[in-house]
Image: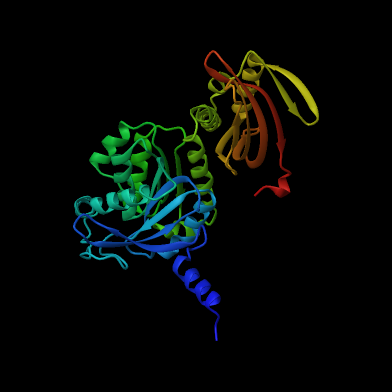
């Protein structure tokens, strides 16, 4: 016969048991018309940013468990919602008639309030930083994520789309919201989403934007299935956005890093050198050099004359620390570059490298300027 102590222990364990941090649990989100929407909530067990995710209407929430779990490890609270009439959510089932205009109109009229209910549910949870929010979506859910960003910008400072959709109103919003950072992944064989992604990235000018295209046909979750590294790329990008939203001083350094990326892709030596002081220190290959802005500009001009970068992307979220006084800082970056060199005979040769470096900064004249850089390159046989 069980002792009273053991019975009491078992009862209390059952009554108050909570899922382990990061484990998804299904919840109900009630829409304004009392329709119950089903969602999965992932709680990191500590304070952090929020990610509201609208998954595509033709697939299941559980397929995004891996991505959501990685976001939780990055410290985010994540809510993955099934739109009404899909999967186990209540409400009328939407029947696509082949018209994109009809679909966009239906999603806006019938699902936008559901999206708002999900956003409010998530931001009401304990520990969610309602000023550090990201909206994500796949397929039809991408449009709901864009509507959510439109309604709650700038608290929603980032958006991720797996197969984009937009309309006239959201395009107007993007043109007026330069601080919204956007990561899009889309198949070139997905005509409607590919056209929307190109429109979105032609309008939005945030240096942190990313547009990843696949030549194979894929839609929504299919993009992750075709390109497994895409999930890690999204996580690194989002962790950087979360970090950027925490401190304006850190944000400025990260914004400069994004400008550095753009300058490498465009081959803009002048802009790249503009963020250097008159003199700084460079350390590489066991050697220390005293560099000048002018000499570095000439080096970059020569470098970009023969090398065109196709990619310049973070492999890890940058680490940035600012001194208590706010006038000095350091940062560590790790980047993979893919490029094409033009040889003296005019032939082309593709290559890539992984570089990590530490930079120190001083605040001068209200601007962060890099005062030293120490860099190292990963051996070619180790590059991912």
In percent of the image, x 59 and y 20: which residue is there?
Answer: 327
Q: Residue at x 28, y 36 (%)?
A: 173
What residue occupies the far bottom of the structure in this picture?
1
Residue located at (45% from left, 61% from top): 24
Q: Quarter-wise, where is residue 36 in the image?
A: bottom left
Numbered marks: total:
0
Residue 361, percent from left and from top = 62, 23
**Which residue is more in the foreground, 319 or 370?**
319
362 vs 36: above or below: above
* 222 sits to left or right of 358: left
Q: Is residue 101 above or below residue 322?
A: below
- Judge whether residue 147 can be spotted in this image: yes
Q: Quadrant of the N terminus?
A: bottom right
Q: In this rendering, would 226 be left or right of 314?
A: left
Residue 77 drawn at (x, y percent): 45, 51
Q: Is residue 15 above or below residue 280?
A: below
Furthest toward the right, the residue is 286
Q: Position of residue 336 (x, y in %)?
A: 61, 41
Q: Quadrant of residue 59?
A: bottom left
Residue 347 in view, yes or no: no
**Viewed as shown, does residue 62 lie left or right of 144?**
right
Whole-percent x, y for residue 62 in the image: 43, 65
Q: Nearer the viewer, residue 103 or 80?
A: 80
Residue 199 higher or lower than 248, as above or below: below
Residue drawn at x 38%, y 65% as measured from the top left: 60
């Amino acid at each position: 016969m069980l002792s009273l102590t053991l019975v009491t222990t078992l009862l209390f364990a059952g009554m108050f048991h909570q899922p382990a941090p990061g484990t998804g649990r299904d919840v109900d989100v009630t829409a304004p018309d009392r329709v119950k929407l089903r969602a999965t909530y992932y709680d990191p067990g500590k304070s952090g940013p929020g990610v509201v995710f609208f998954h595509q209407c033709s697939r299941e929430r559980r397929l995004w468990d891996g991505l959501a779990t990685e976001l939780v490890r990055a410290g985010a609270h994540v809510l993955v919602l099934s739109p009404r009439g899909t999967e186990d959510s209540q409400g009328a089932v939407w029947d696509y008639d082949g018209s994109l205009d009809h679909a966009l109109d239906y999603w806006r009229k019938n699902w936008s309030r559901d999206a708002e209910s999900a956003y409010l549910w998530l931001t009401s949870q304990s520990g969610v930083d309602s000023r550090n929010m990201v909206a994500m979506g796949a397929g039809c859910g991408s449009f709901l994520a864009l509507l959510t960003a439109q309604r709650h910008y700038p608290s929603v400072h980032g958006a991720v789309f797996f197969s984009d959709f937009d309309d006239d109103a959201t395009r107007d919003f993007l043109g007026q919201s330069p601080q919204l950072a956007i990561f899009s992944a889309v198949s070139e064989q997905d005509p409607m989403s590919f056209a929307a992604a190109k429109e979105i990235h032609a309008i939005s000018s945030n240096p942190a934007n990313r547009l990843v295209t696949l030549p194979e046909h894929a839609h929504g979750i299919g993009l992750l299935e075709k390109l497994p590294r895409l999930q890690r790329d999204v996580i690194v990008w989002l962790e950087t956005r979360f970090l950027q939203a925490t401190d304006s001083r850190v944000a400025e350094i990260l914004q400069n890093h994004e400008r550095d990326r753009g300058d490498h892709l465009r081959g803009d030596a002048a802009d790249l050198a503009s963020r250097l002081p008159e003199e700084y220190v460079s350390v590489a290959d066991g050697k220390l050099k005293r560099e000048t802005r002018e000499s570095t500009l000439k080096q970059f001009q020569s470098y970009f004359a023969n090398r065109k970068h196709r990619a310049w992307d973070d492999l890890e979220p940058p680490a940035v620390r600012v001194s208590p006084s706010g006038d000095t800082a350091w940062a560590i970056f790790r980047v993979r570059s893919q490029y094409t060199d033009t040889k003296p005979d005019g032939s082309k040769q593709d290559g890539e490298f992984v570089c990590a470096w530490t930079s120190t900064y001083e605040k001068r004249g209200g601007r962060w300027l890099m005062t030293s850089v120490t860099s190292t390159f990963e051996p070619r046989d180790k590059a991912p």
